[in-house]
Structure formats: structure tokens, C-alpha cells
């Protein structure tokens, strides 16, 4: 049986990842592939508990290094217990955020050493890279407005605008460095236009994976 494809979806907070991930999974199913949705941090029971630790306003400061290591600990759980078995069974996997989020948020946003992040990436997932990474790109103000409508901000959503500017620039730099893996989607406009762009990125992937 053919191994499934691994697709990740990235972007700043409030760019419409959830809606577009549902759309993406429908596109994959319509082509006759089984798809599993997962998210980071999270995706397995234990990793979801780490997610709670990361997003709550906890009782003590969370040092940047502890934050980074918790994201990678959650990733190791999701990869070994969920993503790899699904791909081996032939399912496609769509993951809401992956290592690019650590590069953009902890690297570009917090200023942690990118080389150290790459050491963790190599350690945790080695040569397992996403086949396609959809980057939903929008100015931070778009995300702020949408996130505000959803109610109270979690620990990461409480960061300053300057942090989100660095995160966005970090993502765009990653996409520029790996244009074959990334599809950069302008997520600031209407949903129909965003989904047209996602469909054409997926058409290219399907063309390489005829049933
Ligand atoms: P997510 O569930 O995608 O939040 P939202 O749907 O609100 O965009 O991600 C949770 C938060 O964790 C988000 O603020 C991004 C952050 N994050 C990192 O900082 N580093 C990481 O490696 C990952 C996976 C997420």
C-alpha cells in the first residue's frame, strides 16, 4: 500500500486555519484518499495535556527554552503515536501546525537560536518532512480582529503586535527558502479566493499522486 502524504497548515493566529483545514480534508477525500486531521501542540491524549500547559496562563513564568522543549515533546508524541502509524497505513495526514511553527514562533518570535531548533527537529523527526506546507499569510491585524471575535486570549495570543510581525516575517522567510515545499496563500481576502488558491496548490500535489 502506498504511504500517505503529510500536509501541514501554518500561519499566524486567527488566519482561518480551522475553516481551511476542513476544506482541505474534503478535497483530499473527494480524490478517494482517507485523511486524518491532527494538530500541534496536541493530537494524542498526552500531547493534548502538554497543549493545556502551553496555552494556559500558568502559575509561574514559562522560560522560552521550556516552551520550545514542550512543543517538541508534544510533537514527538504526535509523530510516533499518531502521524507515522497513519501514514504507514496509507492515510493522508493534515496537521494544524508543525515544526515551522516552532521556527516562526520560538525562533523568529522569541529569538531562540535557529540552529538549536534544527537540532531538535532533526532529533524528533529526522527526514520526515511535510510534502506540502500551506502557509496562510495575512498581516497580524487581520488575525487580531478575527481572534478578538473568538473571546479571551490564550497565553500566546496575549503577545504584542511586534511579536506577531516577527512571526509572520519568519514564516515568509521559511517559505522563500523552501519554495518547493511551501504554498503561500494570501489569507487576508475573501474565503472563496483563499480556497481557490488552496485548491490549486492541492491540484499540483494530486497530479503527482494519481490514484
Ligand atoms: P493553534 O492551535 O494553531 O492556535 P490557533 O488556532 O489559535 O492559531 O496553536 C496554538 C498556539 O501555539 C499558537 O499561538 C501557535 C503556538 N505554537 C508555537 O508557538 N510553536 C509551535 O511549535 C506550535 C506547534 C504552536
Image (spheres, helix red, strand yellow):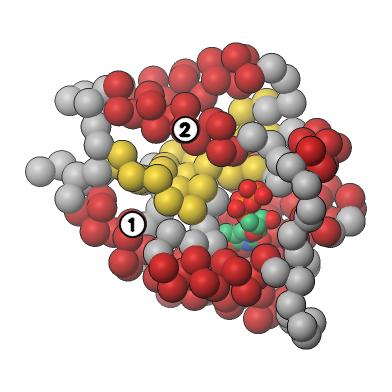
Q: Residues within 10 Å of mark 1 (few under 14, many from 20)?
A: many
Report the Cα–Cα distance between label 2 and label 1: 18 Å
x%, y% of residue 39? 49, 53
x%, y% of residue 134? 53, 36
Quarter assignment of residue 104: bottom right
Please determine whether, in this image, residue 78 is positioned above or below residue 191. below
Label 2, secondary structure: give it. helix
Q: Residues within 10 Å of mark 2 (few under 14, many from 20)?
A: few
Tag 2 near tag 1, CB within 8 Å: no
Instruction: State the residue lying farthest toward the front.
Output: 151
The residue that mark 1 highlights is 83
Q: Is mark 2 within 8 Å of ligand 1?
A: no
Residue at point 56%, 38% (across, down): 18
Instruction: Please tell me in which quarter of the rendered image ligand 1 is found.
Output: bottom right
Quadrant assignment for the N terminus = top left
Please determine whether, in this image, residue 156 is positioned above or below residue 93. below
> In the figure, is residue 92 to the left or right of 9?
left
The residue that mark 2 highlights is 22
Amino acid at each position: 500500500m502506498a504511504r500517505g502524504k503529510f500536509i501541514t497548515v501554518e500561519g499566524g493566529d486567527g488566519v482561518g486555519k480551522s475553516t481551511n483545514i476542513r476544506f482541505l480534508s474534503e478535497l483530499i477525500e473527494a480524490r478517494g484518499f482517507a485523511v486524518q486531521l491532527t494538530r500541534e501542540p496536541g493530537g494524542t491524549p498526552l500531547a493534548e495535556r502538554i497543549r493545556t500547559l502551553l496555552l494556559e496562563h500558568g502559575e509561574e513564568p514559562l522560560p522560552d527554552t521550556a516552551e520550545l522543549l514542550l512543543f517538541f515533546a508534544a510533537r514527538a508524541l504526535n509523530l510516533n503515536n499518531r502521524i507515522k502509524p497513519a501514514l504507514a497505513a496509507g492515510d493522508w495526514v493534515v496537521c494544524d501546525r508543525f515544526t515551522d511553527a516552532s521556527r516562526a514562533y520560538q525562533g523568529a518570535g522569541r529569538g531562540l537560536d535557529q540552529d538549536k531548533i534544527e537540532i531538535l527537529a532533526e532529533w524528533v523527526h529526522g527526514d520526515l518532512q511535510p510534502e506540502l506546507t500551506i502557509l496562510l499569510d495575512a498581516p497580524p491585524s487581520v488575525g487580531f480582529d478575527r481572534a478578538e471575535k473568538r473571546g479571551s486570549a490564550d497565553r500566546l495570543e496575549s503577545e504584542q503586535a511586534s511579536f506577531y510581525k516577527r512571526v509572520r516575517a519568519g514564516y515568509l522567510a521559511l517559505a522563500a527558502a523552501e519554495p518547493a515545499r511551501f504554498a503561500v496563500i494570501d489569507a487576508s481576502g475573501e474565503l472563496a479566493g483563499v480556497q481557490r488558491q488552496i485548491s490549486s496548490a492541492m491540484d499540483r500535489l494530486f497530479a503527482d499522486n494519481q490514484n
